[in-house]
Image (spheres, rainbow, N blue to C red):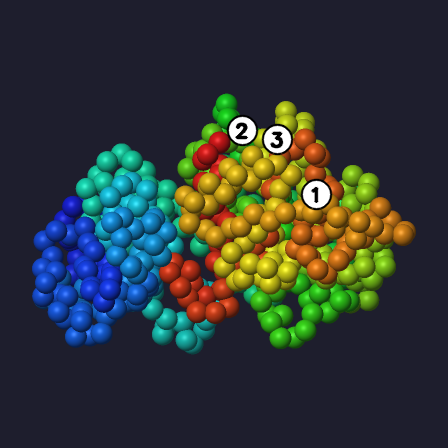
Amino acid sequence: MATLKSSEKQSSDILVIGLSQKAGKLTIESSNSTLNAKSLLATLEDLGATGKSEEVTKVPFTSPRMIVVVGLGESEKEFSSETLRRAAGCATRSLAGHKVADFALPHKNSAQFAAIAEGIALGAYNFTDFRGSTKIDQKAPLNSANIISKIGGSSEGKASLKRAEIIAAQTHLVRNLVNTPPSHLTPDSFSQTMKKIATSLKLKSEIYTHTVLKSKGFGGITGVGQGSANPPRLFHVSYSPAKPKARIALVGKGITFDSGGLALKPAAGMEAMKSDMAGAASIVATIFAAAQLKLPIAIDGWAALAENMVSDTAQRPSDVITIYGGKTIEVLNPDAEGRLVLADALVKAQEVGKKAGGLDALIDVATLTGAQGIALGTRTAAVMTNNEELSDKFMKATQVSGELFWPMPLPEELRASLDSPVADMANIGDRQGGMLVAGLFLKEFVEPSVPWIHLDIAFPAFNDRGAHGYTSVGGTGVSVRSLISLLESF
């Protein structure tokens, strides 16, 4: 991750600026007033630059040695924070192999300055942990960046730089966990690794082993994990500042690999199922970031971890399990397993929250349904809720973070499809509206008085296409920035 600083002067031999266009006319967009825009524009036109969003053009120069021009799209009096965040990330990715660069992207306020800082820090990422002979061929991410700005020297500007570095580091942690193959990331190794980090941040944490889970009645987590040689875990981490202004519980789905169990998934695309623990990684990283930012919010995180595998001990279609708290579930589809582990953790999170005086919000994050991608595509995640005020608060947080989320309903008429003739509920219902049915299933485990939102990040959590903006191929780390913005709003 790039180290960030800010000054009003250029300090390296690489300069990043913006380029916009309107009606075929190009305009240099930069916070560096000393730049000779006229001669540079002529060169850019000769090179065929268009100013299209995220287009990168590298121009050999004299002083600086190279100018990196990133497209901002159509000319605006003031570019949005997300446009600047993506442009900064795109330029940073193009500078892999270089150590330092100056960024002179246009900005007029502290929010835009912060977005540029975040884009740089998020874009400076690669994952080479499992490369052997080819590791030497991989270009290292940009090491440090200087943002040319009058804002950076203020206390607010300095805080923005620190915040960007912390959020990027924790987003990269999520990306690393998602990108780690299931041969190396199991429920236990996830828990042990996160416990070490929690300890280093002076956070309390505990690991519920398979034996403990079974003895205490966590039937969802143990049922999903019973077919694997790698037994399940429930990882609990707590951040408890003095005099907290709110108390939040975060719950994350942590299926370290999802074969589909006896409802075996097709081979095509199954390799991406190492990403099925992205929700658990996101909520734990969010708590780490909150602790580093010293937010005055008490947070309990619950990562429900299991490996959903095929074996002679795996859950069978028609098995009945008992979720923590006593509700019975007929498992009609062993590949609808995420909601089962979440149900256990949601009930436990509320139990602990009630003992501490009650929860101001309960939030679960999960790569839950393929239906999410059908409804909203690969970059926009879904929000479902029992409390519109909390949902609106979260959507305002996404405007700050720049992450794409969209509110979805929980229609009561779909609830009947989850009825079972032999148990309290079935784990699947109507295929039509499958994302909403999954949300309705989870709602059954949330007390009506507890404000709750469910985030389905199934497709946005893993980018199996080309890199874009500040987002690399593989794990994306989606939801961490929005959750931090939400916590800050409390």
- For the residue marked with disc 1, what is the amino acid? Lys
Per the image, label 2 sits on a secondary structure element best described as strand
Contact between labelled residues 2 and 1, with CB atoms less than 8 Å apart: no
What residue sits 35% from the left and 57% below the top?
86
- Residue hosting label 3: 359
- For the residue marked with disc 3, what is the amino acid? Leu
- Residue hosting label 2: 246
Q: In this view, does 340 lie to the left or right of 468?
A: right
Upstream in the sequence, badge 3 or badge 2? 2
Q: In which quarter of the image is residue 23?
A: bottom left
Q: Is residue 158 left or right of residue 461?
A: left
Spot occupied by residue 427 in the image (x, y as percentages of width and height): 77, 54
Q: Which of 345 and 404 is in front in this view?
A: 404
What residue sits 45% from the left and 66% below the top?
473
Spot occupied by residue 398 in the image (x, y as percentages of width and height): 46, 45
Per the image, label 3 sits on a secondary structure element best described as loop
Structural crowding at the residue carrying mark 2, measured as other residues with C-alpha within 10 Å and reported as few (<14), some (14–19) or many (≥20): some
- Residue 343 seen anywhere in this rendered image of the structure: no
